[in-house]
Image: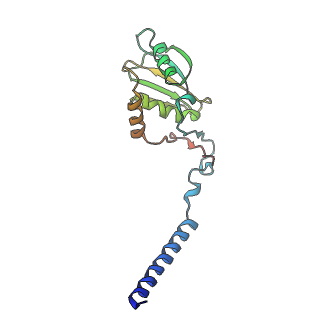
Amino acid sequence: MSFARVRALVVVGLLAVVALVFVVVAMVRDTQGKAGAAGGCPEGWPLADITLREPKDVKINVFNATDQIGLAGNIADDFRNRKFQVKKTATAPKGVDEVALLRYGPKGVGSAHLLRAYFLNNAEPVYDAKRKDDTVDVVLGNGFQQLATTTEVNQSLGDLGAPEAPAGSCPMPVEK
């Protein structure tokens, strides 16, 4: 074996050892393992379930806050056809000018995130830290025209990114 080959093997071997040392040091000093844990959550803050749900796992109530008669029932049927669990339909006590309001609590954060995509991120999220159930109230407003198509929902979910814990809450630890 020539001197040039030996020198090249020594250099490559040293680079491999240095890379291995860097990897080991990075793994030993890593502090991100506890980043999402509830241990860093201030006392009294609710834990938000930021798991993005499938439509079949999302429970909703649909309310009509417009002058259109029967809108809540029609949209509830649309949601049922898309495999959502519609619990209740009703008329909201006062009108809403927005496209829709999504009212939810800490257990409904991931579900509300999915529903925002069905309104192309034009629904106004209304987070209530005291709410105990995982149901999301969908309040249809005067700006509502129709639910998004499957393709539009998928594109909107990509634009929205991953669900995040609302202000005043901490993300629920993910079970491994």
Left or right, 11 with respect to 135, comes to left
The residue that appears at 46% across and 17% down in the rendered structure is 75
Task: Between residue 83 and residue 67, name the one nearer to us.
Answer: 83
Q: Residue at x 47, y 42 (%)?
A: 162
Number of marks present in the image shown: 0
Q: Is residue 57 above or below residue 28?
A: above
| Colour pattern | rainbow
Q: Is residue 1 above or below residue 81?
A: below
Picture coordinates of residue 138, whole percent (x, y): 49, 23
- The N terminus, quarter of image: bottom left
Relative to 86, say whether 41 is above or below. below
In x, y percent, where is residue 125?
46, 31
Q: Residue furthest front?
A: 1
Return the residue found at the far top: 69
- Residue 71 on image: x %, y %: 44, 13
45 horizontally vs 77: left or right = right
| Image quarter of residue 98 | top left
Residue in view at x 45 percent, y 77 percent: 15
Q: Quadrant of residue 7?
A: bottom left
* Percent x, y of residue 59: 57, 26
Q: Is residue 43 left or right of residue 55?
A: right
Going by the picture, which residue comes out furthest to the bottom?
3
